[in-house]
Amino acid sequence: MATGLSIGKLAQAAGVNIETIRYYQRRGLLDEPPKPLSGFRRYLPEQVKRLRFIKRAQALGFTLDEVRALLTLDAACTCSETRALAVRKLALIERKIADLVAMRQVLGGLVEQCDAGDGGSDCPIIDVLNRD
């Protein structure tokens, strides 16, 4: 009897779909086990943990390239470098939040201008988007 998990069982255990696993393999984030002559590839149970790591890192905003770096840092046990990567990601997220707050303020102001208008043909939102 074969040991390990089929790709379907691996996907189910990790909460991803099969195509996600194949994509991660193509990106070099997950090893593809050899295919035996008489059957299907079998994945080690540890691959579930790796897939979950990748998905959690993505949920925190890390790109797949950054996830690869995190996986390398994990193997090298270099907490200070991992922290530096997380600090850079946090700074990027904070800049994005500031940008979103500014966008919300501008759009909110434009919506208020529309609400205060007479409903005529000049739309403040379209006017702003048409400016040179």
Image (tube, helix red, strand yellow):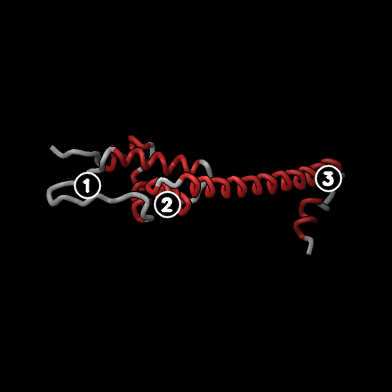
What residue does disc 2 label? Answer: 68
Closer to the camera in the image, 32 or 11: 32
Residue type, label 2 = Arg
In the rendered image, residue 7, in percent from the top left (x then y), is placed at 28, 43
Q: Position of 111 compared to 28: left or right? A: right
Mark 2 to mark 3: distance in Å?
47 Å
- Whichever of labels 1 and 2 marks the residue nearer the N terminus, that label is 1
Looking at the image, the residue that sits furthest to the bottom is 132
Name the quarter where the C terminus is drawn.
Answer: bottom right
Look at 36% across and 54% down and name the residue there: 28
At mark 3, the secondary structure is: helix
- Whichever of labels 1 and 3 marks the residue nearer the N terminus, that label is 1
Name the quarter where the N terminus is drawn.
Answer: top left
Look at 59% across and 45% down and name the residue there: 90
Closer to the camera in the image, 3 or 75: 75
Q: Mark 3: few, some, or many residues within 10 Å (few <14, many ≥20)?
A: some
Q: Mark 1: few, some, or many residues within 10 Å (few <14, many ≥20)?
A: some
In the rendered image, residue 12, in percent from the top left (x then y), is placed at 33, 36
At mark 2, the secondary structure is: helix
What residue does disc 1 label? Answer: 41
Residue type, label 3 = Gln
Mark 1 to mark 2: distance in Å?
23 Å
Q: Quick check: marks 2 and 3 in contact, CB under 8 Å?
A: no
The quarter of the displayed image where residue 111 is located = top right
Look at 79% across and 55% down and name the residue there: 128
Look at 18% across and 38% down and name the residue there: 3
At mark 1, the secondary structure is: loop
Q: Quick check: marks 1 and 2 in contact, CB under 8 Å?
A: no
What residue does disc 3 label? Answer: 113
